[in-house]
Amino acid sequence: MKVSMDNHSHSLSLWCRLGTAVAAVVLLLSAPLAAQYQMPPPDFGESYSLPTQSHPEPPSGWVNILDVALLASGLGLAAWLILKKRSRRGVVLLSIGALAYFGFYRQGCICPIGSIQNVALSIADPDYMISFGVLAFFFLPLAAALLFGRVFCGGVCPLGAVQDLVLLWPKKIPRKLDRVLGILPYVYLAAAVYFAIWSLRLTGGEEGIVVARRFLICEWDPFVGLFRIAGSFHMLALGAVFIIGGMFIGRPYCRWLCPYGGILSILSRFAWKNVKITPGRELDCGLCAEACPFGAIAGNRADRGACLSCARCYDSCPLHSKRVPGLVTIAQGPGRNGARV
Ligand code: SF4
Ligand code: SF4
C-alpha cells in the first residue's frame, strides 16, 4: 500500500514538474513571438531601398509554432528513416512532404539557410531582435546534425528535395574538382555574414562604390522563385540553371554553394550517429559508391561531412534491397566473401 502511495505521489510530482516546465517554456516564448511584428527592419544604409514585398505577411504565432513542430518532427522522422530503417523510399516520401509544405505552401519563407543572416545580425546589433521561429529554424537542424548527421539535408530541406527529385542522369564529378568547389560554401558564408552586418565602401573614381548592407542569401536564393512561382529575373534564371544542371549533377547548390550546408558539414563530422557503410551490415561490394551521386563514398566508407543522408547507398545494397533472394544468408554465413564474386 505504501509503495503504491509512493508511486502515486512520485508521478504527481513528475506531472507538476512537467507542467511547470511547459508553463516556463510558454512564458519564455511569448515575448519573442509577441515582438515579432514590432521588429523594425535592419538599417541597410541610405543607398539601399527595401524591395516591395512580394510574399504574404508573416504568419501568426500558432503557424510559427506549427512550423517549428513540423521541423522537429521531420528531423526526428528523417533520422529514424535514414539511420534505423535505412529506407530510401521513406526518405523520398518525407522530402516530397517537406517540399510541399516548407517549399510551396510556406513559399520557402522559413529557412535555416537564410536565418544565418538574422542570427549574425542579431549578434552584432543588440537592437535587432529575432523571433523564436527563426532561432529554432537556425538551431534545430544544427543540433540534429550533431546527433544524427545531415538528416535535415536528407529529408527535410525543400531546397535539397527539389534538387534530389530532378536528378535524372547523375554524372561523376572528379574528386579534386569537387573538393575545390567545396570551398565555395564557406566563402559565400563569410560574404553573407559580412554583408548582413556591414556595408562595403570601395574608394576609386569620383565617388567610389558603396555596397550597402544586404541579405545576400535571400537575394540570391535560386529556388524561392520556383516556390513562389514569381521573382526577379536573376532569381528565376539562377533557379533554371540549378535545376537544369541538377538533372546531371547531384545537388550542385548543396555541395558547392549552400552556406548552411557548410556548417552542417562541419558539425556532422562530430555526429553521435551517422550514415555508415559497415562490413557487418552491408555487403561491402562497392555498389554503394556507384549509387552515391554526391561522391560521398570513398573506399566503401561514407564521408561524414559530404554525406547528404539520402539513403541511396542503402537502397543500392543487395542486402537491403532484397533484390537477390538468399544473399542475406550467404553474406551473413561463413561463405560471405564468396557472395561478392
Ligand atoms: S546543403 Fe543546404 S540546400 Fe542542401 S539540403 Fe542541406 S541545407 Fe538544404
Ligand atoms: S553516402 Fe552518398 S548515397 Fe549514402 S546516404 Fe550519404 S550521400 Fe546518400
Image (tube, grey):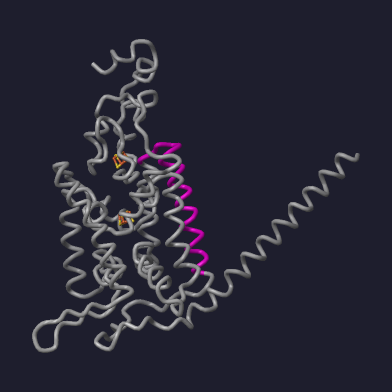
Q: Is residue 109 above or below residue 262?
A: below
Residue drawn at (17%, 74%), measured in percent from left and top?
233
Toward the front, the furthest residue is 203
Residue drawn at (40%, 61%), measured in percent from left and top?
101
Q: Is residue 249 left or right of residue 307?
A: left
Q: Quadrant of the N terminus?
A: top right
Residue 58 spot, x, y in % from top left: 43, 76
Q: Is residue 65 magenta?
A: yes
Toward the left, the furthest residue is 205
Write down which quadrant ligand 2 falls in: top left
Residue drawn at (44%, 37%), measured in percent from left and top?
85
Residue 147 spot, x, y in % from top left: 46, 45
Q: Is residue 319 above or below residue 241?
A: above
Q: Is residue 24 left or right of residue 171?
A: right
Q: Quadrant of the C terminus?
A: top left
Q: Is residue 125 magenta?
A: no
Q: Is residue 170 above or below residue 317?
A: below
Name the quadrant containing residue 216.
bottom left
Residue 318 spot, x, y in % from top left: 31, 26
Residue range in magenta is: 63-88
> Residue 269 or 281: which is nearer the viewer?
269
Q: Is residue 16 left or right of residue 59?
A: right
Q: Is residue 44 above or below residue 117?
A: below
Residue 332 spot, x, y in % from top left: 39, 17
Toward the right, the furthest residue is 1
